[in-house]
Amino acid sequence: MPSHTLTVGFDLDMTLIDSRPGIKAAYETLASETGVYIDTDLVVSRLGPPLEEEMANWFPADAVAEACDRYRALYPDEAIAPTTALPGAREAVEAVQALGGRAMVVTAKYEPNAKLHLAHLGIGADVLIGGLWAEGKAEALLEYGAGIYVGDHTGDVRGAHAANAMSVGVVTGPCGEEELRAAGAEVILPDLTAFPAWLRSHTGA
């Protein structure tokens, strides 16, 4: 499919955006509505896996789907405004585009809500694919020919490698440098502010 010689994928939560305040707010509203206790501080300390996995920690199996639907419905009003771009997020995406490449976001998040985040924060990705986690992210990365995938979670490392892409880890999320390196990340950056210079060096630009 791609005519671009350079396609770079980015994870969303805790890679491009700090969605913890917004997610916490959405979960708090859900807990208030349902009367179900949710440790929202714990929830936002381990972002990455699909919503259904987290919700199963708080709701019985037969109520998870309904809870997820309600959370996703609450999300636009509760979670978009409080969420901020992480340092260097816009510049990282623009660095790919400045080299004539394509920047894509591949996330486990519900795609319509992910789109709201990008629009609100002015992060101009060329492609957005939602609803994919860990090795499942390889589906989109392979379709668009991504040679690099940037993420904050060991699941992102697995997704990159399943697509035969280079894994670039950033330590802005729940997984530290040692954990990302042990998972096989080829490159570890402190955050995305270091990405443009790394990319130029990597591509010889």
Image (spheres, rainbow, N blue to C red):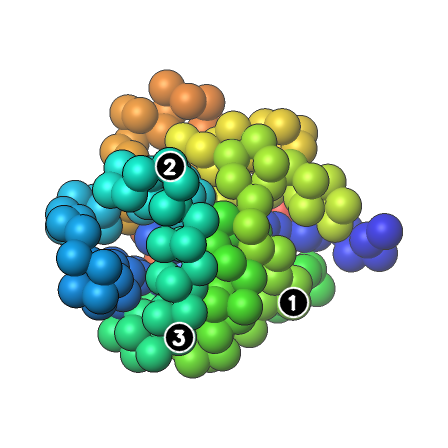
- Residue 161 x %, y %: 59, 28
Query: Who comes first in sequence, dot 2 or dot 1?
Result: 2
The answer to whether the residue labelled 3 contacts the one labelled 2, judged by CB atoms less than 8 Å apart, is no
Q: Residues within 10 Å of mark 2 (few under 14, many from 20)?
A: few
Instruction: Give, as a three-letter code, the residue at label 2.
Output: Ala
Question: Which kind of residue does numbered mark 1 sit on?
Answer: Asp
Mark 1, residue position: 126
Above or below 112: residue 54: above
Crowding near the residue tagged with mark 1, few <14, some 14–19, many ≥20 C-alpha atoms within 10 Å: few
Q: Which residue is label 3 attached to?
A: 76
Look at mark 2 in the image and give the residue it sits on: 61
Amino acid at pointer 3: Pro
Nearer to us of marks 2 and 1 is: 2
SS label for mark 2:
helix
The reply to whether discs 3 and 1 touch (Cβ–Cβ < 8 Å) is no
Residue 92, position as x, y percentages in the image? 47, 61
Indicate the quadrant where residue 62 lies.
Answer: top left
